[in-house]
Amino acid sequence: MRGRGEEIRQFILKNVELHATDIASVTAEHFQVSRASITRHIKVLLDKGELQAEGKTKNRIYRLPNGFREAPILLRISDNQDEDKVWREVVASHMERVNENIRKICHYGFTEMFNNVIDHSEGELAAIRIALSTARLRISLHDDGIGIFEKIKSRCGLVDHRQAILELAKGKLTTDPNRHTGQGIFFTSRMFDRFYIQANQLIFAHDREITDDWLIESDQSKYGTNVYMEIDLDSSRDIAEIFREFSSGEAGNYEFSRTHVPLKLARYGDEDLISRSQAKRVLARFDRFKEVLLDFADVDFIGQAFADEIFRVFANNNPEIKLVHVNTRKEVKKMIQWVQGGRDHQE
């Protein structure tokens, strides 16, 4: 339990800047424990001076002692905005203290995300916040538009906002194929140590330490979109290695051909993945990839129909697409092997 407690406290410290007012509920949801338990961990951090609190009861705000406190820069969104110009005039001057590899990652991530704000948000104002601590750099964007998950849902004819998040996690999703490839969010989320999109009362996140994508419900951000990109200042990661990880092309000629799909994003609450209709939602747009990693982390059981639709019907009809299942628990693996007639393909 001691190791678990330290894991919880580290999660609080890494996420408190994003959830200054609701860190207790976010942490409780993530670890599936009571808020009372999380409150005890917060008290430990307060006593050790690793966390600070302002206000009382429901209005209490938590911060890191040397947290990010940069004032936002407000810009009016318009069709003639140039994301590279905004980068040079607003953001680049904050990169003087960081290593070249981190500057390039920030350049890529900011311009991709700000271009999405210009082209897709349908908002009027954008707020940019760049902040440095002794260990991390964060870039955050906020717009007052309709919310990214609502935009994807309505333009792509999806069932709901959760399905929009599942499609976003796969990559190659765009509401404007004439001007966008749909790769920006996917690669940006993999370049930074922590990446969050908060919109339409949902949060989609990718954390390199957690290693998979996850979503939680939030009572904030009913309107607009918040994007947070954070990277550790001692990171040695570079853009090229991320492109190589998800491509099959030679160096300098990358082809986005591999994707990673967290199956838990296809679940609603505690429901199991059992039906063919659920499987078909998962399979949407797989034909755009050569290899798909189906990540079964936190999935304890799948139904015969769900497994059959993916690992027999789709696999037989699309032999050119390699399906690889990872983080597969014993019962899930047995179901996959059953529908495959004893064959199996896993990592």
Image (spheres, helix red, strand yellow):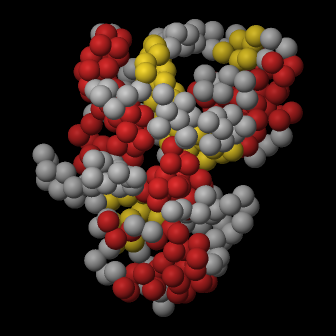
At 81% from the left and 18% from the top, the residue drawn is: 59
The quarter holding residue 298 reads bottom right
Q: Is residue 311 visible in the rendered structure shown here?
A: yes
Measuring from the top left, give residue 68's x and y in whole percent.
54, 13
At 47% from the left and 24% from the top, the residue drawn is: 126
Number of disc labels: 0
At 42% from the left and 34% from the top, the residue drawn is: 117
> Outermost residue toward the bottom?
341
Name the foreground residue: 185 vs 325: 185
Measuring from the top left, give residue 303's x and y in whole percent.
64, 79
Measuring from the top left, give residue 151's x and y in whole percent.
50, 48
Measuring from the top left, give residue 50's x and y in whole percent.
66, 14
> In the displayed structure, would residue 159 be above or below residue 182?
below
> In the displayed structure, would residue 95 be above or below residue 126?
above
Q: Is residue 245 visible in the rendered structure shown here?
A: no
> In the displayed structure, would residue 294 be above or below residue 204?
below
The quadrant of the picture occupied by the C terminus is: bottom left
Name the foreground residue: 294 vs 229: 229
The quadrant of the picture occupied by the N terminus is: top right
Name the foreground residue: 128 vs 3: 128
